[in-house]
Image: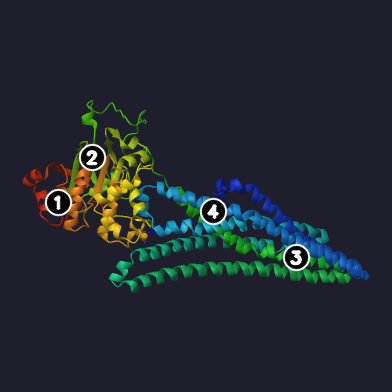
Amino acid sequence: MPTTPVPAKAPSSARSLLRLWPYVRPVRARLLLAAVIAITASCLSLVIPLVLKWMVDGPVADRDPGGVWLGALVLLLLGIAEAVLFGIRRWLVSRPLARLEAAMRGDLYAHLQRLPVAFHDRWASGQLLSRGTTDLMLVRMFLQFPLTFLVVNGTTILVGFIILFAQDWLLALVLLIPVVPLTVLISYFESRYALAARRAQDQIGDLTTLVEESVLGIRVVKGFGRHRSQARAFKELSQELRGTELVKARLLAGIWSAITVIPEIAIGAALVLGTVQVADGDISAGTLVAFLSIALALRWPVESIGFLLAMSQEAATATDRYFEVLDEERERDTPVGGGSPERAEPTNPAEPTNPAEPADPADRGGLRFEGVSFRYPDSAEGVPPVLDRIDLRIRPGETLALVGSTGSGKTTLTALVPRLHEVTAGRITLDGEDIATMPRERLRALVSVAFEEPTLFSASVGENVLMGAADGTAAPAAELDRALAVAQAGFVRSLPDGVDTGVGEQGLSLSGGQRQRLALARAVVGRPRFLVLDDPLSALDVHTEALVEAALREVLRETTALVVAHRPSTVLLADRVALLSGGRIAAVGTHQELMRTNAEYAWLMSGSTGTGEGNHPR
């Protein structure tokens, strides 16, 4: 199962968390104000021991009930003020941090839409889902609590020790002794916990992927009786995650125990020494009470360091995982490095000019492949390219069928036209304009694609089909009816809500043939200038196929089309046929010509199954 590698050494947590600054900057004023309020509230708790000192050395020692009641009232007011201030702090940060999390999630989703197909081929969907949900929740929780309270607790400890030294420097020195061993332990804990946190979050991504695949592939799981093997795989991943979480729990328990026990020993030693000093008359009883009260008030800031650091490490890991995706390079409108040479954008995109093109516009029109080669970015060194020096021209208004054995690179070739992949060498032109110089938005408005595997979304039939229409289509209802008629998708009228019927996740409530017809309707609804169809009729029965072909002929007369074909009936839709063999164009001609002159083509069209393997498993 694909997963991102766990780094051997965790990067600096501070360096990782600093990358959040662009998102934090808009809410920095609120966070700063919340921190100031929290520090004020926390320091109020240190005033309470001083009030106790005054009460013990004053009203209590003097047996003054009025003074005791006054002291009690002051303590009550201090407690109420502290609670109100902490409530205000939470109110200040909750809404802006929820917006921050939403903004980060929105940026991640938008970036994923702009990443090349090769990225999505490499990454498991569960890893991406966990980064957009669990990881961002950890980041928000860090900004809401640990970020503030690491500052608040650090300030509280500093102010507390200043007050302790003001009360009695010797007792304060006793409480400072644990600082050295605690610093060493925290450093050890931080490095170990960071690696465990990264491993756990990656395993959550793997587990999410398995669950998603099992749900989407439930028909396969049930059809082959693989529920037990899937359950075993789930159990194994769950056990791995459980083991990692236990490692985290042991580390956290260890540091928590140390942070709790060592200061307690120091407080006990200070209590014994302070009692002796009171007995000797060196300090007053009120001073000892205030000193111990402050020391006990500092227990929470000190003890909380363990889980605050744990949450910070998890947030740092989540931040690293988030930016791993955002650091991936987006698709470029003009590729850098290999592929077509960079060109300046034409001043009038509707009328592209290129000095290298033939002067006659008729010779420049249509779809052309000029010396196109392609290899996948993850191909092993020395492996031949999937496509090698493809030269092919489809004239304006012409339909060209692309035929080849399984694995010959037909689907890869069609994916190059809308720039789902970038060519490694050579170039592709539409009406004489190099697609590498065209903004992708404009390119994909010109080229419409129907893939071999029809993908539908959890939306209505109409919404799925109209995804292929240009924004602002004049009469969407009329175009929808026309596209459904071309695809022979009249079955939608018998659905419960007609074209408004939801098709469910990936359209699995429909049959394969129905999904394929809707995908074809989506491709033709926008009346594209260029149409790329990857075996669009493979799931249809012969009668439906004949009806679709008859309607499709009318569409093909109005467009320039490249059609991947496996059956003679689909080939007959085309004006000419190109045979792709071994990553190269082996022959071009009409169906009848190639049947007479090319043995490989005749064999492919005879009904035999192609066995030739390409250079890449895609």
Rendered location of residue 67, percent (x, y): 90, 66
Q: Nearer the viewer, residue 255 or 436?
A: 436
For discs 4 and 2, the disc positioned in front in the rendered view: 2
Which secondary structure, mark 4? helix
- Report the amino acid beneath label 1: Ser
- Report the amino acid beneath label 2: Glu
Which secondary structure, mark 2? loop
Mark pair 3, 2: CA separation: 85 Å
| Residue under the point 27% across and 36% down | 429
Q: Which residue is mark 2?
A: 558
Rendered location of residue 19, percent (x, y): 54, 48
Mark pair 2, 1: CA separation: 20 Å
Q: Nearer the viewer, residue 146 or 609?
A: 609
Q: Quadrant of the N terminus?
A: bottom left
Among the two numbered marks 4 and 1 on one chain, the one whose residue lies closer to the N terminus: 4
| Residue under the point 30% across and 73% down | 225
- Report the amino acid beneath label 4: Glu
Q: Which residue is mark 3?
A: 295
Mark pair 4, 2: CA separation: 48 Å
- Residue 101 is labelled as 4
Q: Are marks 2 and 1 in contact (CB under 8 Å)?
A: no
- Report the amino acid beneath label 3: Ala
Which secondary structure, mark 3? helix
Among the two numbered marks 4 and 2 on one chain, the one whose residue lies closer to the N terminus: 4
Among the two numbered marks 3 and 4 on one chain, the one whose residue lies closer to the N terminus: 4
Q: Which residue is mark 1?
A: 569
Rendered location of residue 347, percent (x, y): 37, 28
For discs 4 and 1, the disc positioned in front in the rendered view: 1
For discs 3 and 4, the disc positioned in front in the rendered view: 4
